[in-house]
């Protein structure tokens, strides 16, 4: 029998490899023969696939990225790694068992895989679709809260990418105190503010490197802003 702690290594590793599958890159390459890293926004994600290959294929790529996150976490939810797993509600600040550790690490690693794909020499997207798949499963309410923050920040600031990141930062502390959980989360010990908060923390950590440049560019006036034309020098490169 495989020792329980071995799964703490194996499951995140598999999640990283699955997360690394660059569906957007593959769909765009299949439809157009173009490398997403060299065209459009140069981002390996659903939006750039829409720009390069059309709305339908961009939506398909985004849906597959969404599924990566959802299915990886769902799989480990359905497997009992720890004999102490009870499936009953726990105190919201109790760290119940090994399964919780695996949930957190798998969620983090599948987003890391998408953002830094081993198959694309550690290039990738920004993890929004994959993160949405995870959040939709562990707690749809937290996904709605994030989308609300993202939309409001975009409307107020007109900045798209920084709003994506700051939306995550604003959502993070709320995740630790969410009182409402879906039935499937309750049945798999995910009705726990500490675990949910740490899952969102893992997503934020996995996406921080992708947003350093946009945030810096925002303060330097080089970041794309809705409705405003940017004046860039020939040495500046804009990746929206």
Image (cartoon, rainbow, N blue to C red):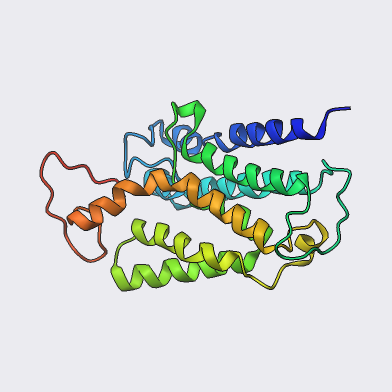
Q: Where is residue 185 in the image (x, y as percent from the top left)?
A: 75, 61
Q: Is residue 175 above or below residue 211?
A: below
Horizontal placement of 153 versus 30: left or right? left
Residue 237 in which image quadrant: top left
Q: In this view, does 232 lie to the left or right of 151?
A: left
Residue lying furthest front: 94
Q: Toward the viewer: 213 or 70?
A: 213
Residue 39 in the image: state x and y as whole percent: 32, 38
**Residue 20 in view, yes or no:** yes
- Which residue shows up at 74% across the image and 67% down it? 182
Count the labels in the image.
0
Is residue 23 something one can see in this rendering?
A: no
The quadrant in which residue 11 appears is top right
Instruction: Name the residue: 45% across, 52% down.
Output: 55
Front one among 193 and 125: 193
Q: Is residue 165 toward the left or the right of residue 8 in the image?
A: left
For the point 68% across and 31% down, the residue is 9
Q: In the picture, which quadrant includes the N terminus?
A: top right
Q: Residue 131, position in %: x, y?
A: 55, 52
């Amino acid at each position: 029998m495989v020792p329980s702690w071995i799964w703490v290594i194996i499951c995140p590793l598999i999640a990283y490899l699955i997360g690394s599958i660059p569906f957007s890159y593959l769909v765009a390459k299949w439809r157009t023969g173009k490398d997403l890293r060299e065209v459009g926004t140069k981002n390996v994600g659903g939006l750039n696939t829409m720009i390069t290959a059309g709305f339908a294929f961009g939506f398909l790529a985004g849906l597959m990225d969404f599924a990566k996150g959802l299915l990886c976490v769902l799989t480990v939810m359905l497997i009992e790694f720890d004999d102490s797993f009870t499936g009953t509600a726990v105190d919201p600040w109790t760290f119940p068992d090994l399964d919780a550790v695996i949930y957190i690490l798998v969620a983090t690693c599948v987003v890391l895989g998408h953002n830094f794909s081993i198959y694309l020499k550690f290039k990738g997207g920004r993890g929004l679709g994959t993160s949405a798949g995870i959040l939709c499963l562990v707690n749809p309410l937290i996904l709605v809260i994030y989308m609300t923050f993202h939309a409001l920040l975009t409307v107020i600031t007109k900045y798209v990418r920084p709003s994506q990141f700051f939306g995550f930062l604003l959502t993070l502390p709320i995740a630790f105190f969410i009182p409402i959980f879906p039935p499937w989360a309750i049945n798999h010990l995910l009705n726990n503010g500490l675990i949910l908060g740490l899952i969102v923390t893992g997503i934020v950590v996995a996406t921080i490197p992708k947003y350093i440049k946009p945030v810096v560019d925002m303060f330097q006036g080089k970041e794309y802003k809705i409705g405003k034309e940017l004046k860039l020098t020939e040495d500046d490169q804009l990746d929206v």
